[in-house]
Amino acid sequence: MPKIVDHDKQRLLVAEAAWRIIRRDGMEQASVRNIAEEAGISAGSMRHYFSTQSELLLYAMNLVSERVSNRIKQMSFNGSPMENMKLLLLEFMPNTDEKMAEMEVWFAFTAKSKTDPALKALADKVYDEIRQAIATVITYIVKLNLSRANLNEELEIERLYALVDGLSIHAVLRPDQMTSEIMENALSLHLAALCRGEE
């Protein structure tokens, strides 16, 4: 009887092998041959799952975005408005080992996207989605009448986006200094400063 192969599962295993190589050895080592070896399959077998290296990298990059989206969909927002907004924003930040792995891979892909049009299109799409989530937080604060007077929504969206992105980059580059506790405290402080009574 022929062996039945779950192609979706194999694609996932290959993508996760690509992640491990990128984290351990860098994007320049993410060749089809190295990824196949890491995944425990032959380079020839890779063609059954991905026709090109670009297709494989695109799939592996998209996997990061899908995992974040799936976690957000499963979240229960049962706290105060400020706690709920903080929880949402923390999903875009590397405050756990799992999210640190995703963020390290994501930044490697983002750097490569500067020279790969297929990856750039996906990177732009995901960054636009993150900005939209951050815009929702600012809009929510204003709608609930929690914001300080004369808050400039567009400017505050960019400022919060820069904070989330900046803290995340620092956590990836200097995890010994930018701990999850510091990230969460900085985020809490910033959210509080957006509200009335904190001017």
Image (cartoon, helix red, strand yellow):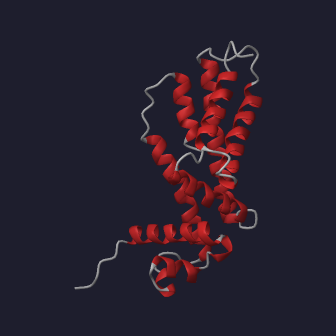
Residue 42 or residue 1, whichever sits in front: 42
Residue 22 or residue 1, whichever sits in front: 22
Residue 80 point in image, percent of width and height: 50, 22
- Above or below residue 141? Residue 161 is below
- Above or below residue 48? Residue 193 is above
Residue 39 point in image, percent of width and height: 47, 76
Q: Quadrant of residue 28?
A: bottom right
The residue lying at 42 percent from left, 33 percent from top is 76
- Above or below residue 85? Residue 45 is below
The residue lying at 46 percent from left, 47 percent from top is 70
The residue lying at 64 percent from left, 25 percent from top is 139
Residue 10 point in image, percent of width and height: 41, 72
Q: Is residue 90 visible?
A: yes
The residue lying at 53 percent from left, 27 percent from top is 83
Q: Is residue 9 left or right of residue 114?
A: left
Q: Quadrant of the N terminus?
A: bottom left
Q: Is residue 36 left or right of residue 115?
A: left
Q: Quadrant of residue 158?
A: top right
Taking the view exactly as shown, the residue that stands out farthest to the left is: 1
